[in-house]
Image: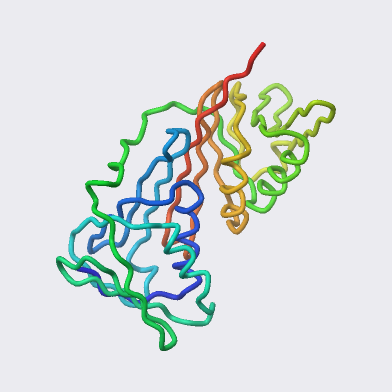
């Protein structure tokens, strides 16, 4: 059971962070709020979202799990006026969830949870390096790298205390270095990994709205991005596997 009301902009942001990774997912509902943990079909990227009950204007729910077509939901909420309040209604045992706003009412068919990939376990990976950067600055670096290459390297140089992002194309090269003194947090470690920009471009657009993004890094390890939405009432974690560098 779910009966809730939420500002459209908040719900839209929550949908977009999930849609950046997967087109469908299992939505876990409880009295504490909504939660999603999903991995893309190629097992390269993972999303973990917790949207607490305080993010909603009103919220009443019982424990349940439903399957959602996130791509369809994203298209629906994109058409809603930012000033509207969205209501969600999911009775016990229902096969559809009702979304209502501004006189409109949508009935969205739920997916059979047995046809949706199970929630993945969180991997226990030690990522010793950490920096905190503004989401807009991170997204700008990702966009700049995509002009010259299809991959980007994130790294930390503990010797000169810098965090760097660089990309190499066939003929062009781009590099951004940020000194520890210019970062909100800097935990040095020998770290460098290469990542696909195909994934990062979608993730970057979502993270661009975040005031702060925590980046956890290792050497040839996945990267973890952590940030908040909904005024701090929603927590998002992205985990992206590295690309293997050829000699």
Reply above or below: 70 against 183.
Answer: below
Residue 8: percent from left, percent from top = 47, 74
Pick whichever, 132 or 96, lies toward us.
Answer: 96
Residue 15: percent from left, percent from top = 45, 60
Reply above or below: 55 against 164.
Answer: below
Quarter occupied by the N terminus: bottom left
* Lateral position of residue 50 relative to residue 149, left or right: left
* Lateral position of residue 68 relative to residue 175, left or right: left
Q: Quadrant of residue 104?
A: bottom left
Which residue is painted at 74% across and 36% down in the image? 179
Quarter occupied by the C terminus: top right
Which residue is painted at 78% across and 33% down in the image? 175
Pick whichever, 102 or 107, lies toward us.
Answer: 107
Pick whichever, 209 or 100, lies toward us.
Answer: 100
Residue 81: percent from left, percent from top = 53, 79
Task: Check the image and name the residue furthest to the bottom.
Answer: 103
* Lateral position of residue 123 relative to residue 1, left or right: right
Residue 177: percent from left, percent from top = 76, 35
Task: Check the image and name the residue furthest to the right.
Answer: 171
Q: In this figure, what is the number of numbered marks?
A: 0
Which residue is painted at 27% across and 61% down in the image? 32
Which residue is painted at 31% across and 36% down in the image? 121
Task: Check the image and name the residue furthest to the top.
Answer: 247
* Lateral position of residue 120 relative to residue 214, left or right: left
Is the image coloured rainbow, by chain, by secondary structure, or in one colour? rainbow
Q: Quadrant of residue 2?
A: bottom left
């Amino acid at each position: 059971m779910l009966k809730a009301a939420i500002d459209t902009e908040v719900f839209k942001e929550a949908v977009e962070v999930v849609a950046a990774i997967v087109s469908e997912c299992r939505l876990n509902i409880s009295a504490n709020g909504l939660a999603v943990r999903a991995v893309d079909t190629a097992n390269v990227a993972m999303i973990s979202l917790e949207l607490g009950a305080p993010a909603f204007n009103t919220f009443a729910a019982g424990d349940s799990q439903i399957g959602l077509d996130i791509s369809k939901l994203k298209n629906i909420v994109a058409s809603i006026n930012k000033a509207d309040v969205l209501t969600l209604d999911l009775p016990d045992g229902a096969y559809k969830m009702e979304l209502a706003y501004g006189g409109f009412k949508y009935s969205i068919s739920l997916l059979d949870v047995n046809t949706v990939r199970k929630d993945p376990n969180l991997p226990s990976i030690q990522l010793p390096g950490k920096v905190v950067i503004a989401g807009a600055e991170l997204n700008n670096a990702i966009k700049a790298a995509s002009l010259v290459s299809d991959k980007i390297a994130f790294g930390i140089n503990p010797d000169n205390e810098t965090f760097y992002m660089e990309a190499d194309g066939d003929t062009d090269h781009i590099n951004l270095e940020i000194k520890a003194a210019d970062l909100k947090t800097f935990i040095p470690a020998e770290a460098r990994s290469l990542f696909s920009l195909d994934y990062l471009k979608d993730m970057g657009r979502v993270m661009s709205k975040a005031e702060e993004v925590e980046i956890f890094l290792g050497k040839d390890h996945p990267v973890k991005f952590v940030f908040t939405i909904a005024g701090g009432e929603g927590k998002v974690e992205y985990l992206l596997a590295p690309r293997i560098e050829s000699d």
